[in-house]
Image (cartoon, helix red, strand yellow):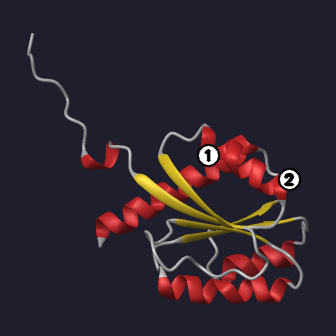
């Protein structure tokens, strides 16, 4: 019997990730906190509770930016090109009380990673976060 043990690859190692959550809704913050609590990776959450999103100047660039859509929707969608330009590897996830398929289509066309109902369960949000970080790590590894 061989004493050789499989060695973990760098991609298997836990990776620190940064997620910015843009919302003033306490219920959404709680869902995010619950989703992150059971998350298999190490995630630091930087929360901006203001309606007017201004990204932190210092710190690591975000891997994920989660935006709770508020009125007017157009101003929330206008954040996407700026985020994509500043942090091309960041995945933007929108949450919305609306189930309008046109909003979903517009968000995806503009480059959002996902558009979810704000009633999303923490475990469902966890799956989406895991997928976003997995694709983000693949993009960085290819670069």
Q: Badge 2: how crowded within 10 Å, few (<14), some, or many (20+)?
A: few
The residue drawn where x is 88% and y is 85% is 72
Q: Badge 1: how crowded within 10 Å, few (<14), some, or many (20+)?
A: many
Q: Secondary structure at mark 1?
A: helix
Tell whether 80 sits left or right of 18: right
Residue 19 drawn at (x, y percent): 56, 62
Residue 111 drawn at (x, y percent): 61, 79
Q: Please identify the residue farthest to the front as the structure is shown.
A: 58
Answer whether labels 1 and 2 touch (C-beta < 8 Å). no
User: Which quadrant, please, contains the N terminus?
Assistant: top left
Tell whether 72 sits left or right of 66: right
Viewer-nearest of labels 1 and 2?
1
The residue drawn where x is 24% and y is 44% is 9
The residue drawn where x is 47% and y is 44% is 41
Tell whether 135 sits left or right of 112: left
Q: Quadrant of residue 8?
A: top left
Q: Earlier in the sequence, mark 1 or mark 2?
A: 1
- 101 or 133: nearer the viewer: 133
- 131 or 44: nearer the viewer: 44
Residue 69 drawn at (x, y percent): 81, 73
| Position of 23 relative to 84 (above/below) | above
Q: Please identify the residue farthest to the top as the structure is shown.
A: 1
Residue 82 drawn at (x, y percent): 58, 89
Q: Secondary structure at mark 2?
A: loop
Tell whether 83 sits left or right of 35: left
Residue marked by disc 2: 119
The residue drawn where x is 68% and y is 82% is 109
Q: Which mark is residue 36?
A: 1
């Amino acid at each position: 019997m061989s004493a050789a043990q499989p060695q973990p690859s760098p991609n298997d190692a836990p990776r620190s990730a940064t997620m910015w959550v843009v919302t003033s809704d306490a219920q959404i913050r709680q869902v995010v906190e619950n989703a992150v609590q059971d998350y298999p990776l190490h995630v630091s959450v930087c929360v901006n509770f203001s309606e007017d999103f201004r990204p932190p100047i210092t710190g690591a660039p975000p891997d994920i930016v989660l935006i709770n859509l508020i009125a007017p929707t157009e101003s929330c969608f206008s954040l996407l090109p700026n985020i994509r330009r500043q942090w091309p590897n960041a995945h933007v996830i929108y949450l919305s009380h609306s189930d309008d398929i046109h909003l979903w289509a517009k968000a995806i066309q503009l480059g959002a990673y996902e558009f979810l109902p704000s009633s999303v369960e923490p475990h469902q949000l966890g799956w989406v976060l895991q997928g976003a970080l997995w694709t983000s790590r693949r993009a960085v590894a290819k670069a």
